[in-house]
Image: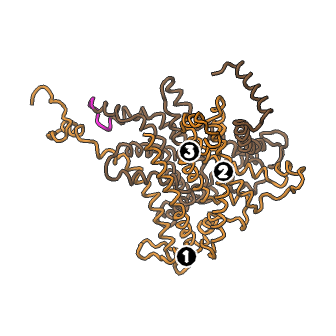
Chain colours: A brown, B orange
Amino acid sequence: MNTPAVATRAERRSLSDWFADPFRRPRFLATVTWVYLAWSLLPLLVSIRISFNEGRSRSSFQGWSLDWWTGPGDSALHNPDLANAMKNSLTLGLFTTLIATPIGVALAIGLARWRGYGRRPANLLMLVPLVTPELVMGSALLLVFTTMFTSIGLGRDAQLIGHVTFTISYVVVITRGRLFTIGRDVEEAAQDLGATPMQAIRTVLLPLLGPAIFASLMITFATSIDDFVISSWLSQDIKTETVPMRIYQSARKAPTPSINAMATMMMLITFVAIALAMWIPRWLHRGGNSGSDSAVQDFAALDL
Amino acid sequence: MTALDPPRVTNPAQATFRFGRRGIAEWRAARPPRALWPFLASPGVLWLCAFFVVPFYAVLAMAGGTLDEFATPIPEWNPVAWNGEQILDAFRSVLPGGTNWNPMRRTVVYVVIALALCFVIAYPVAYYVARKAGRNKGLLLLLLLAPFWINYLMRMLAWINLLQTDGYVNDVLDPLPFVDPSEWLSGRSSTLILGLVYGYIPFLLLPLYAALDRIDGRLIEASRDLGIGPFRTFCQVTLPASRQGLLAAGAITALPMFGDYYTQDLLSRSPRTQMLGNQIEDALQQGASKQLGAGLVIVLSTFLTVLMAYYLWSTNRAAQEVR
């Protein structure tokens, strides 16, 4: 670690070096990186700024107001279509999380400990949804709900089932990373002390898995409210529209920034969920090695 | 029965079953918990069978199905009666001369160009953040991760805002010579490719970052110490060491790109830029021809199986090396 004074001097020197030879590595790499970051984030900042416009323009800045967020009439909170879309997204995300997390955690524990016939096919069955393009999964689900499971049909139930189907694998991947680091020792110790396997899972393994389960809850929620393809293929009508679907429907049509306000609102909710997933386990296990970092990284490394 | 309990029997071969509650508890404790793990996995496995495997069967049934007297498509549930010729027709339609040849060709061209651009942009960025960022690493990672969690549609919306005819992109380009401000959002392949690169580059950056971060720095130092120049070190040490991660990252980015249809719908919406995903969406969601649509889903899945298998194989291998 440098002391601040040294760091400043080093920075000053690197700046003069840069003037002497701007393309000396890693200045070139640093420039590419910052240009990339600007390109990747500036359009979003413009889009967010537009949501605070006073006027109706969606292509330029026009004053400041919260009209498109909370104002009466056409705003993210009061336009019935937008409010309905947000309600649908949040409800869907909540129920998906509540169903997918327990199923996924049980599947992860089962797959990690299961020896013998059936483990490999089950493992493959868990992995394939991670690499299946959503278009393929969405169209397959559409066909099955319109021809075979007609009693469920299209609509909220189908959307919920679809979301659970593609999020289970994420939960398994996050939980599995943590399971490998825990190992079997503590569980075997519990069983040597007289616990049944089920008791060992309940009293020893599940508390240790806490951070991973928490990360799964939040990431499942964030993934679900961000999903467009599955929700869209399994939607019935405007009543079952979610936020990404609303953006898709009106991005080229809607004349007002209220759509930007709604998108920004959902972005903030996702960020809060992700921030909670990263920081709460760390905060709960202050001092200890929480492992939530590795859980999020495992997930990031496998899929996105 | 003695007053003292016998020690708990842990070897199932020696277990003698006793009746009563205590007997059952003893038997449970002694029994190797083999059945417990499949039991725990069963809800997930059953769920995925019902809502992942069965839907694929429904796709096959629809692709090989028939029409009833009102010309409504009817799935054929008996595999023996599937109309194989009809499924083959879907495959033929994406070959040169077929009705879907153009969308198929465009899909491949767009994805290949977009993926190449993604690599060109993402490799230096990932390399810098993983190996050279120093004190800024945490902040840079956070900024790299941000788009990852921002809704894809919102990110496209941001570009729609910018690319409007009276938008900021034209404002910036206006004073430049040789560039005429134009309609970016009506059927330009360049806009669509920009959208694909912008949309999918985070999916490439993150695994690429992970792969480059894992490289042992001592290898690179050793190469430099032996007097090898930076360029040759990169070609002979860094690149081969990150090759596996590079290919896996490319596969996981290309997969959703091949199934993309909404980027085209949002940024172009012109028949001249239709991709295979758009044909599938038209056929299935608009209901134009469900059987052809289902057939195209099979074509796309078959086409992508290679990429999927490669990705699963390589991550599996990487996981085994770590353990």
Give the quarter of the image for residue A249: bottom right
When the figure is inspected, residue B37 is found, relative to residue A199, above or below; the finding is below
Residue A298 among magenta residues: no
What residue is shown with label 1? B89
Same chain for the residues at labels 1 and 2, yes or no?
A: yes
What residue is shown with label 2? B118
* Sooner in the amino-acid sequence: mark 1 or mark 3: 1
When the figure is inspected, residue B159 is found, relative to residue A270, above or below; the finding is below
Q: Tags 2 and 3 in contact by the CB under 8 Å rule?
A: no
* Sooner in the amino-acid sequence: mark 2 or mark 3: 2
Which chain hosts label 3? B
Give the quarter of the image for residue B140: top right
Quadrant where the N terminus of chain A sits is top right
Which chain hosts label 2? B
User: Can the viewer see residue A56?
Assistant: no
Q: CA distance from mark 1 to mark 2?
A: 34 Å
SS at mark 2 in the image: helix
Same chain for the residues at labels 2 and 3, yes or no?
A: yes
* Sooner in the amino-acid sequence: mark 1 or mark 2: 1
Q: Residue at x 47, y 70 (%)?
A: B61
What residue is shown with label 3? B242
Marks 2, 3: nearer the viewer: 3
SS at mark 3 in the image: helix
Q: CA distance from mark 1 to mark 3?
A: 41 Å
